[in-house]
């Protein structure tokens, strides 16, 4: 029995099941060869896209950090105290996740104010009775605890995610440029 598979001719004297197993394996090998040989440019485009997303995340993180810095630089800073640690439970796919947020009170213009920041942590970042610095916007619309994590957690995490996405791609690209600089004969014309 003579069987023609795209680009390959084989003579088989086996059953149809053996033929389909053989054809599947040949097809898989051909597909892998195509992926590794023909899609080099596509994988480069994907890598550059991932690097671009990472760089955009890092730029956004730096802008967010700068905005936070400018806000804190012009805000009013007062002393506050943690009066309660609130237990928050959020449901995830696997199990409930418990985090803790402080309830903070502070005095401003002879009025007592209190707030609960959006950031929460497990284990609790603050204890009841702990004194903290409170950062308040000039229009009193935004309040935050003056700690690094409370102020800069979002830009820090965005920057780290961007770095994880961009750095390997940039290093690989820089490595390729360095290789072609050191060995120009290796470069495709």
Image (spheres, rainbow, N blue to C red):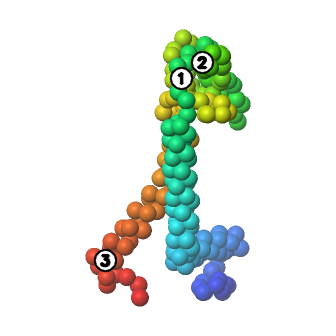
Compared with 170, 22 (above or below) is below
Q: Which percent across, then down, holds residue 51?
A: 51, 62
Tag on residue 91?
none
Q: Quadrant of residue 118?
A: top right
In the picture, the quarter occupied by the C terminus is bottom left
The answer, for residue 104, to whether it is visible in the render is: no
Tag on residue 106?
2
Residue positioned 59% across, 85% down in the render: 8
Labelled pair 3, 2 in contact (Cβ < 8 Å): no
Q: Which percent across, then down, holds residue 89?
A: 69, 25
User: In front: 122, or 84?
Assistant: 84
Compared with 183, 87 (above or below) is above
Labelled pair 1, 2 in contact (Cβ < 8 Å): yes
Q: How many marks on residues?
A: 3
Q: Could you tell whether 182 is left or right of 37 in the image? A: left
User: In front: 7, or 136?
Assistant: 136
User: In front: 29, or 49?
Assistant: 49
Element on which disc 2 rests: strand
Residue picked out by circle 3: 181
Q: Nearer the viewer, mark 3 or mark 2?
A: 2
Residue picked out by circle 1: 78
**Residue density around tag 1, few if under 14, some if 14–19, many if 20 or more, within 10 Å:** some
User: In front: 97, or 81?
Assistant: 81
Q: Which percent across, then down, holds residue 58?
A: 51, 53
The answer, for residue 106, to whether it is visible in the render is: yes
Residue positioned 63% across, 80% down in the render: 12
Labelled pair 3, 1 in contact (Cβ < 8 Å): no
Element on which disc 1 rests: strand
Lower position in the chain sequence, tag 3 or tag 2 = 2
Compared with 78, 162 (above or below) is below
């Amino acid at each position: 029995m003579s069987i023609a598979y795209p680009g390959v001719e084989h003579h088989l004297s086996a059953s149809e099941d053996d033929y389909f197993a053989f054809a599947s394996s040949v097809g898989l090998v051909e597909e892998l060869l195509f992926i590794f040989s023909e899609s080099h440019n596509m994988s480069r485009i994907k890598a550059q896209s991932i690097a671009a997303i990472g760089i955009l995340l890092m730029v956004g993180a730096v802008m967010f950090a700068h905005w936070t810095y400018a806000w804190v630089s012009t805000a009013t800073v007062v002393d506050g105290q943690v009066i309660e640690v609130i237990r928050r439970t959020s449901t995830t796919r696997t199990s409930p996740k418990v985090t803790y947020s402080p309830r903070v009170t502070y005095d401003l213009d002879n009025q007592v104010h209190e707030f609960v920041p959006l950031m929460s942590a497990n284990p609790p970042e603050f204890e009841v009775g702990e004194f903290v610095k409170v950062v308040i916007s000039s229009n009193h619309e935004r309040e935050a605890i003056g700690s690094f994590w409370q102020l800069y957690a979002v830009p820090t995490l965005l920057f780290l995610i961007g770095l994880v996405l961009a750095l390997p791609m940039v290093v690989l690209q820089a490595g390729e440029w360095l290789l072609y600089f050191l060995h120009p004969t290796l470069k495709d014309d």
